[in-house]
């Protein structure tokens, strides 16, 4: 995990990004459709994202891509969607980088959330799109033409205040 100085640097970079109104997702109630476990399979790989609410202002997530045959981890990232000072950010921390990367929420409408960081090399834009109750598509791009789509299907619903025995 990044230290406090790294996290402060990430936040300073995020605050410097241009602000765009995304009021429908401030607070995070407009993004609760992301909560739960999502999985995509493409034959060679299995990609999974898991999201849970840890507070009114924070969702924590994790993403992992595994080989379909043996479950070898190909990539992994710690994810967080956080509301700070009436702005919302997706912050991604991959294993290969010491710094977390912030993406500011630039658009939010019913079933769609767009996060952008024009200063990042790739991706610059991450667009979550709800496709019904059981699917979300994540468009990962340079914000212009280069990118890819991950088509996730719901594996498990997120249940708040779940009591397990």
Image (cartoon, rainbow, N blue to C red):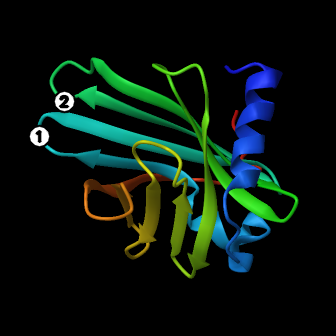
In 3D space, how far apart are the residues under numbered discs 1 and 2 (Cα atoms)? 7 Å
Quarter the C terminus occupies: top right
Q: Evaluate whether residue 160 shows in this view.
A: no
Which one is in front, 55 or 10? 10
**Residue labelled with disc 2:** 68
> Crowding at label 1, few (<14), some or many (≥20) Cα neighbours within 10 Å?
few
**Residue labelled with disc 1:** 43
Q: Evaluate whether residue 135 shows in this view.
A: yes
Q: Is residue 45 above or below residue 119?
A: above
Identify the residue shown where x is 27% and y is 17%. Answer: 72
Q: Residue 24 is drawn in which quadrant?
A: bottom right
User: Could you tell me if the residues under marks 1 and 2 are in contact, i.e. CB atoms within 8 Å?
Assistant: yes
Quarter the N terminus occupies: top right
x, y percentage for residue 28? 73, 64
Identify the residue shown where x is 82% and y is 23%. Answer: 4
Q: Earlier in the sequence, mark 1 or mark 2?
A: 1
Which one is in front, 22 or 49? 22
Q: Is residue 98 above or below residue 116?
A: above
Under circle 2, the secondary element is loop
Under circle 1, the secondary element is loop
Identify the residue shown where x is 19% and y is 30%. Answer: 68
Drawn side of residue 77 relative to residue 152, left or right: right
Identify the residue shown where x is 35% and y is 47%. Answer: 39
Drawn side of residue 153 relative to residue 98, left or right: left
Which one is in front, 12 or 152? 12
Q: Is residue 97 above or below residue 120?
A: above
> Crowding at label 2, few (<14), some or many (≥20) Cα neighbours within 10 Å?
some
x, y percentage for residue 9? 75, 33
In the image, farthest residue toward the right: 85
């Amino acid at each position: 995990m990044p230290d406090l100085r790294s996290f402060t640097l990430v936040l300073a970079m995020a605050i410097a990004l241009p602000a765009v109104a995304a009021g429908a997702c401030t607070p995070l109630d407009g993004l609760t459709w992301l909560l739960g476990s999502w999985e995509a399979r493409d034959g060679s790989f299995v990609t999974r994202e898991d999201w849970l609410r840890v507070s009114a202002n924070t969702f924590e997530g994790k993403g992992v891509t595994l080989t379909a045959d043996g479950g070898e981890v190909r990539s992994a990232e710690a994810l967080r969607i956080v509301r700070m000072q009436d702005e919302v950010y997706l912050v991604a921390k991959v294993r290969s980088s010491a710094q977390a990367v912030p993406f500011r929420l630039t658009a939010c409408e019913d079933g769609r959330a767009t996060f952008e960081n024009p200063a990042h090399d790739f991706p610059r834009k991450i667009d979550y799109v709800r496709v019904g109750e059981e699917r979300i598509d994540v468009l990962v791009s340079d914000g212009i033409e280069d990118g890819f789509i991950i088509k996730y299907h719901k594996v498990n619903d997120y249940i708040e205040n779940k009591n397990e025995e």
